[in-house]
Amino acid sequence: MDGTLPAVAEELLKEIRKAFRETSHVPDDLLLGLKFVFGPSAVPALDLVDQRSVTRVVSPSGRTAYQVLGSSGKLYTCYSSCHFCTCPAFGFTVLQKSESLLCKHILAVYLSQAMEACQELTVSEEQLTSILLAEEEDEG
């Protein structure tokens, strides 16, 4: 989350993290806030979190990426540090048309972090490089 989103979105995610730590659920007012701030990405992102579709992939050097199993069954790589996802929706609605702050996959990453719902996968440096290069090859 590190300052890549507008302040209102950052604050909302902090409030979700706090509420979830205290009560193990997200109150209705924060869910409404999610829908207001993130629009149509909110509900599908929550579904991805509920389905435990977010995996934090970490190498021994500490390099981290996230993989999200999308509703279509395709695996997308997300980078929370630079607010980027490899899915077509991110490229089109976020980057090209600026219609949304983010796609459902990167929102699911942020929500999984806030709700401590990420699965963890430790891989070698070579495996992480392969994951990252595989995404580039898919795009090219």
Image: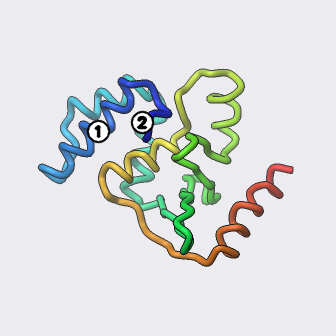
First in residue order: circle 1 vs circle 2: 1
Q: Which numbered disc covers residue 108?
A: none
Give me the C-alpha separation between circle 1 and circle 2: 16 Å
Residue 5 is left or right of residue 13, and the answer is right
Q: Residue at x 56, y 58 (%)?
A: 65
Q: Which residue is drawn at 51% across and 75% down?
A: 122
Q: Residues within 10 Å of mark 1 (few under 14, many from 20)?
A: some
Q: Which numbered disc covers residue 42?
A: 2
Assign the N terminus to one quadrant of the image. Answer: top left
Residue projecting furthest to the left: 23
User: Looking at numbered disc 2 in the image, what kind of residue is underneath it?
Assistant: Ala
Q: Residue at x 52, y 28 (%)?
A: 101
Q: Name the residue under label 1.
A: 14
Question: Residue 79 or 52: which is nearer the viewer?
Answer: 79
Residue 40 is left or right of residue 132, and the answer is left
Quadrant location of residue 99? top right
Residue projecting furthest to the front: 61
Residue 120 to residue 66: above or below: below
Quadrant location of residue 27? top left
